[in-house]
Image (cartoon, rainbow, N blue to C red):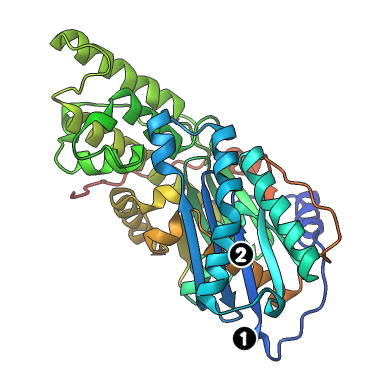
Amino acid sequence: MSMFPFKAHFLRRLQQCRHTCWCTPSPAKGFCSRLILGIETSCDDTGAAVLDGKGAILGESLHSQKEVHLRAGGIIPTVAQHLHRENIERVVQQALERSGVEPSQLNAVATTVKPGLALSLGVGLEFSQRFVRQYNKPFIPIHHMEAHALTVRMLHPIAFPFLVLLISGGHSLLAVARGIDDFLLLGYTLDEAPGDMLDKVARRLSLIKHPQCFTLSGGQAIELLAKDGDRLKFSFRTPMGQTHDCCFSFAGLRNQVTMTIMKQEAEEGIEEGTLLPCVNDIAAATQHTVATHLAKRTHRAILFCKANGLLPSSSPTLVLSGGVASNHYIRKALNIIAETTGLCLLCPPAKFCTDNGVMIAWNGVERLREGKGILPPHVDVCYEPKAPLGVDITAEVRAAAIRVPSVRMKIAN
């Protein structure tokens, strides 16, 4: 594979984008004794945690809205906002009490301000700004996807750069992490995120009526039922097979699955809203196709990075994070690609893949350590429902038009 030529103006653009955040010096001595409160309200989980400068979790609390939204058939932003407002003070207080830390002892407060549901982000930001002004503490605005990408560094001593695949209910992207605020975006979803797509398939299959699935999210239900399904009973096309870039698309796959469900209902004389006998097989085929799509795009990203020297030649790392990264079948698929290409796959534990206050506090720890993005308490901050991650080089990836060799995806449930 030939080296893809980065243009001079493009390299200058990368240099200009390396350090575009607020910076204040942070002395290294005594950093371990620093205490950071992290607050997360970007979607439907209200989370808070207190970490020290080494990343030790001193106390945490999480309130999930999952059951409410499951009954409603999806996340309703105004309901999420109301539940955040109802629970945020209690959640933060619990995290502080469990850590044994008083607000006056904190060195900073880190809060998700982008991207996410506007009404949910607003609750966390409003509470945090009142809090830091009351106790005169520095404020660290956090990019939700950066926090997901860097959580693994709390658990493993991973040096930059590394490749990261972030997959969740609202996002799907591939990026090279070169620093705590320095990312190269290689690919992103063009329509739906994988978690959102799996939730919609689960709703169309009426899995909430399944005795094993009524308390599970859509993605969790699909994974559970797929274990007893035969993925070969149904064949779905892997999306974007003729598009040689690292972007994703899940809407077309969802349409394929929906058409198959409708066909099965018609053949078996079953009305919509009734569980199909073949639901396990549809779940298995859907999960396998999602995993294959993610694996192929990640494979291309690895080849692009290797061709352009974006990853270290020795012990390169692939990080898998985000809520959908909790899916063990998808982890196995990505591990096949990592082993094939000579990368080490690292995933945070499932409890740190979903949204939580710990990952936000850890991102605050990293930023405080480097003195980046730290604001005085009285500076006004706006939330951003849509916020890209890093420098977008998807056009360069597409221009490289890398063809991915076939890899046998034999994955045991």
Helix, strand, or loop for circle 2?
Answer: strand
* 257 over 103 or under it: above or below: above
Could you say where residue 346 lies in the image, as x and y percent from the top left? 41, 65
Helix, strand, or loop for circle 1?
Answer: helix
Q: Earlier in the sequence, mark 2 or mark 1?
A: 1
Query: Which residue does the numbered mark 2 point to in the structure image?
Result: 38
- Judged left or right of residue 292, residue 363 is right
* 65 over 50 or under it: above or below: above
Q: Which residue is nearer to you in this view: 43 or 402?
A: 43
At x 58% / y 40%, what residue is drawn?
Answer: 82
Q: Which residue is nearer to you in this view: 289 or 142?
A: 142
Q: Quadrant of residue 55?
A: bottom right
Q: Amino acid at mark 1?
A: Cys
Query: Which residue does the numbered mark 1 point to in the structure image?
Result: 32
Task: Please say whether residue 101 is visible from this viewpoint.
Answer: yes
Could you say where residue 338 lies in the image, as x and y percent from the top left? 38, 58
